[in-house]
């Protein structure tokens, strides 16, 4: 199994697009922090719990990109027909899918840790400079950053599962992006009662975003819900791959 | 025991039988050519043999086991399908490193396989710059990674230049000569005629014939073309002598597996006039076309 996870990580590491993706995610962290500091809704004070959480939710910047990485890890095999060699070397498809889930979540955890550390490195001095006292917000920060790491890792499971269900990579990525940036956002704004239950709503709540105030689930409920989404997509996707014919 | 055994294998897609009750074998130490026109069901058969597609019925085994149940498939069987692909952005060596890691093979295998197929110099180039022939070589390198005893190659000569074809021929002969088993598919008999010991010919998903190349060659070389005003009468006379013949034109009869002497004697015995008679060497390719066309239109 370690061999297979190593192989899946090697597949990612040997593609330039992977490193560009990682670089883009890291570059987005300061943008996200700046957004939370300058474009905060007037109702939310920067030194309030919500304000702090919004700033530190930049630690979950990698969520959508790890979702896409998960999709590429699975659907990309069909896009370039490398799936044939993959299943020839390892005919036990269950192990291949397990390795893909493990490798993608490892990337998610690693990226989540990097973006979290970067968030701390940028946000702490920035907030200090603006005379925001962080005393008493230690727990908020810790929960938000850990939640962000978890959300990033679980996004990988959703991505691999979704990529297994929709093996047309272009279609899968288009659907994932439209869903993440348009549908989820609209639901959260206009139908918060529904929006809080979507994967995106759960991921936002888990990574501590507090802007969509009141609409989102409490962080622990969101953790359970997003994990359930991850397992459901991964489970349904693997069932399909187990049974289907490979070109 | 044959190394590869296909037994009553069928695959239906909707109402269409892509492979229909197909049985054949490939033995160890020989190169077996798996021949048929495009669309005959070769790739589908190989996909079932390699556990990528599940048969509607029947079985396909390698050394007595379905591919998916082999203990260490990477070290046992090397296979390249026509559909095998590469990520265009990955370097050739990295493509093999990934497969070696997944198969638990030492990384030294990678450079060895690249050297074997003559790609050592291109090892650090990205696959998007590769010609079709180089992709074929890279595919073959991936099949050779685990030093397998069985090679299954789908149209490996496609895109190879004449030098590459010659090299492939030598390579497969050497592989079988060392006790390996080779099953190699092609839609051109001529392409593999110098390589194979045995041929399995299929058309429309069904077996047309399995025989040794020598048998096929001897069957193909003896035809006699006769121009006569009494074509139908001659055909009847030949049939009475158990010589297979058919009308191939208004005044033309083609007699198979026979000699000009036999046809001449038969015609004289029946008192038939002959204007012209030619011994024809139906070459292998024509024979192949004839065998596969008789099975209906090419899909």
Image (tube, rainbow, N blue to C red):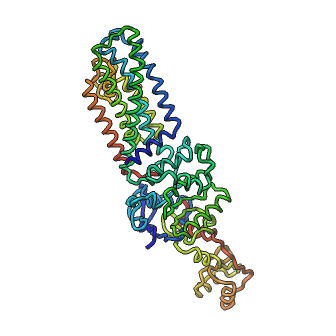
Q: Residue at point 33% right, 31% down?
A: A150
Q: Can you say whether A76 is above or below A45 in the image?
A: below
Q: Is residue A109 visible?
A: yes
Quadrant of the rendering where the N terminus of chain B is positioned: bottom left
* Nearer to us in this view, B152 or A129: A129
Q: Can you say whether B234 is above or below A3 in the image?
A: below
Q: Residue at point 50% right, 48% down?
A: B97
Residue B159: image x %, image y %? Answer: 63, 54
Count of picture labels: 0
Q: Quadrant of residue A174?
A: top left
Q: Quadrant of residue B242?
A: bottom right
Determine the residue located farthest toward the bottom in the rendered image. B269
Determine the residue located farthest toward the right in the rendered image. B275
Residue B218: image x %, image y %? Answer: 61, 78
* Nearer to us in this view, A157 or A232: A157
Q: Quadrant of residue B185?
A: bottom right
Residue B248: image x %, image y %? Answer: 65, 73
Q: Residue at point 34% right, 41% down?
A: A234
Q: Can you say whether A230 is above or below B233 in the image?
A: above
Residue B253: image x %, image y %? Answer: 66, 78
């Amino acid at each position: 199994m370690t061999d297979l996870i190593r192989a899946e990580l090697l597949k990612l590491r040997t593609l330039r697009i992977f490193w560009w993706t990682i670089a883009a995610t890291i570059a987005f962290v300061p943008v996200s922090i700046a957004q939370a500091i300058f474009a905060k809704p007037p109702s939310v004070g920067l030194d309030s719990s919500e304000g702090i959480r919004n700033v530190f939710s930049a630690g979950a910047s990698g969520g959508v990109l790890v979702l896409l990485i998960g999709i590429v890890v699975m659907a990309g095999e069909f896009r370039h027909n490398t799936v044939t060699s993959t299943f020839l070397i390892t005919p036990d498809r269950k192990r291949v899918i397990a390795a893909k889930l493990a490798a993608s979540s490892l990337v998610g955890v690693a990226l989540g840790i990097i973006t979290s550390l970067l968030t701390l490195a940028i946000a702490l001095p920035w907030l200090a400079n603006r005379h925001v006292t962080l005393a008493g917000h230690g727990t908020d920060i810790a929960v938000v950053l850990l939640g962000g790491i978890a959300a990033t890792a679980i996004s990988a499971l959703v991505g691999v599962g979704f990529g297994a269900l929709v093996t047309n990579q272009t279609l899968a990525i288009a659907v994932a992006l439209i869903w993440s940036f348009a549908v989820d956002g609209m639901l959260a704004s206009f139908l918060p009662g529904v929006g809080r239950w979507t994967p995106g709503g759960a991921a936002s709540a888990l990574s501590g975003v507090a802007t969509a105030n009141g609409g989102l689930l409490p962080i622990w409920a969101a953790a359970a819900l997003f994990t359930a989404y991850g397992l459901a997509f991964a489970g349904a996707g693997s069932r399909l791959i187990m049974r289907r014919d490979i070109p | 025991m044959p190394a590869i055994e296909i037994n009553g294998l069928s695959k239906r897609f909707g109402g269409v039988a892509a492979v229909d009750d197909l049985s054949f074998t490939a033995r160890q130490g020989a190169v077996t050519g798996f021949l048929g026109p495009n669309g005959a069901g070769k790739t589908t058969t190989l996909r079932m043999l390699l556990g990528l597609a599940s048969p509607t019925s029947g079985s396909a085994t390698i050394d007595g086991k379905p591919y998916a149940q082999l203990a260490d498939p990477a070290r046992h069987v090397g296979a390249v399908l026509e559909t095998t692909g590469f990520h265009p952005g990955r370097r050739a060596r990295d493509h093999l490193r990934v497969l070696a890691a997944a198969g638990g093979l030492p990384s030294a295998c990678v450079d060895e396989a690249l050297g074997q197929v003559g790609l050592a110099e291109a090892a650090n180039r990205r696959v998007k710059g590769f010609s079709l022939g180089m992709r074929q070589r890279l595919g073959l390198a991936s099949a050779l990674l685990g030093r397998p005893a069985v090679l299954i190659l789908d149209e490996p000569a496609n895109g190879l230049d004449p030098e590459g074809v010659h090299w492939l021929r030598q390579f497969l002969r050497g592989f079988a000569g060392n006790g390996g088993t080779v099953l190699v598919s092609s839609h051109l008999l001529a392409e593999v005629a110098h390589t194979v010991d045995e041929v399995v010919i299929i058309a429309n998903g069904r077996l047309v014939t399995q025989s040794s190349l020598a048998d096929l060659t001897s069957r193909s070389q003896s035809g006699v073309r006769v121009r006569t005003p009494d074509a139908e009468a001659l055909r009847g006379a030949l049939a009475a002598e158990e010589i297979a013949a058919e009308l191939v034109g208004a005044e033309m009869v083609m007699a198979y597996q026979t000699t000009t002497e036999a046809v001449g004697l038969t015609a004289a015995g029946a008192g038939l006039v002959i204007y012209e008679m030619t011994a024809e060497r139906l070459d292998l390719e024509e024979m192949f076309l004839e065998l596969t066309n008789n099975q209906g239109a090419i899909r």
